[in-house]
Image (cartoon, helix red, strand yellow):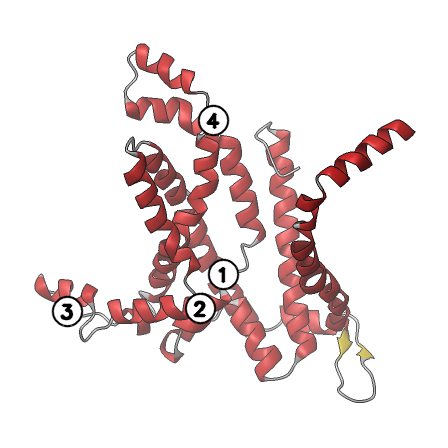
Amino acid sequence: MINTNNKILKRIYKDRYYYYLLIPATAYFIIFHYIPIYGVKLAFEKYRIFGGNQWVGLAYFEELFTSPAFYKALMNTIIISGLKLLIGMPVPLILAILINEVNNKYFKKYVQSVVYIPHFLSWVVIAGIFTMILSPVNGMVNEIVKAFGGTPVSFMTSTKHFRGVLVVSELWRSAGWDSILYTAALSNIDPTLYEAAKIDGANRWQRNIYITLPELLKTMIVVFILNLGFFLNAGFDQVFNMMNDSVISVADIIDIYAYRIGLLNMNYSYATAVGLFKGVIGMILIITVNKIAKKNDAGGLY
């Protein structure tokens, strides 16, 4: 036992510089993710600037579940997140497969760089880009619409089109970055499987259907589980920077609702209850789907 511990300590010391790299990330999670958990108790108290907080139990949750505005925000969140999940899951997978099919390594690196770049743009910049592109006056999209004899559409102020704008902008920003995980998984597939299938007469489409997709199934499930954990996070930064009063009826998601109630109206306890509700639902979704995946031998997080 002592010899084993000594070996472990020697190995840690040998690789100490790699462990040093973990310090900033560990500090970040402790300071900004774990310590704030203590503030969850505010959801069960009436916040007072002076005189100390008053314990109210589940009063704010009762108010939450009887609020029509909350249910409207919840429905908007489910619709937007559902659309992002439905469309955002297959697109990175398809993109990774297409990139993997490129034989020219220089062109492949160029394509990868181009599709990764949007991920590093802030939503402030992306909101400005889409506002210009979709402008009903001289936006590129509406210029094309007018060229084909159509009527310009104000996408950014239309309740009919705004959710579509959110989905498309999210897809443009994250599809390339999200494809990295699939690209890494593709590199681990045994190339002899493709060679054997090619000898048997399988074309490229058949090789992807019968080899690539089954080999990526566990990765797809892990990505799906992770996305479900953030299902009620419809994207505060995105919606906050792109929404306006004309589309608030379809864009008022839970995060915006909590921001409005908590910061603007200074009802911090109620906003904390909203955040706790989100966290609990996310945890339940992750645990449930992970158990189902493990039960069916389809992989999982743990």
Instruction: Say which residue appears at 46% left-offset and 53% top-offset.
Output: 82
- The kind of residue on which mark 2 rests is Val
According to the image, label 1 marks what residue?
234
Q: Residue 116's x, y, as percent? A: 39, 50
Q: Earlier in the sequence, mark 2 or mark 1?
A: 1
- The kind of residue on which mark 1 rests is Ala
The alpha-carbon separation of the residues under discs 3 and 2 comes to: 26 Å
Q: Are marks 2 and 1 in contact (CB under 8 Å)?
A: yes
Circle 3: element type: loop
Q: Earlier in the sequence, mark 3 or mark 2?
A: 3
The alpha-carbon separation of the residues under discs 4 and 1 comes to: 30 Å
Q: Residue 267's x, y, as percent? A: 65, 81
The label number, if any, that marks residue 151 in the structure image: 3
Q: Residues within 10 Å of mark 1 (few under 14, many from 20)?
A: many
Q: Earlier in the sequence, mark 3 or mark 1?
A: 3
Instruction: Say which residue appears at 44% left-offset and 68% top-offset.
Output: 239
Q: Residues within 10 Å of mark 2 (few under 14, many from 20)?
A: many
According to the image, label 4 marks what residue?
215
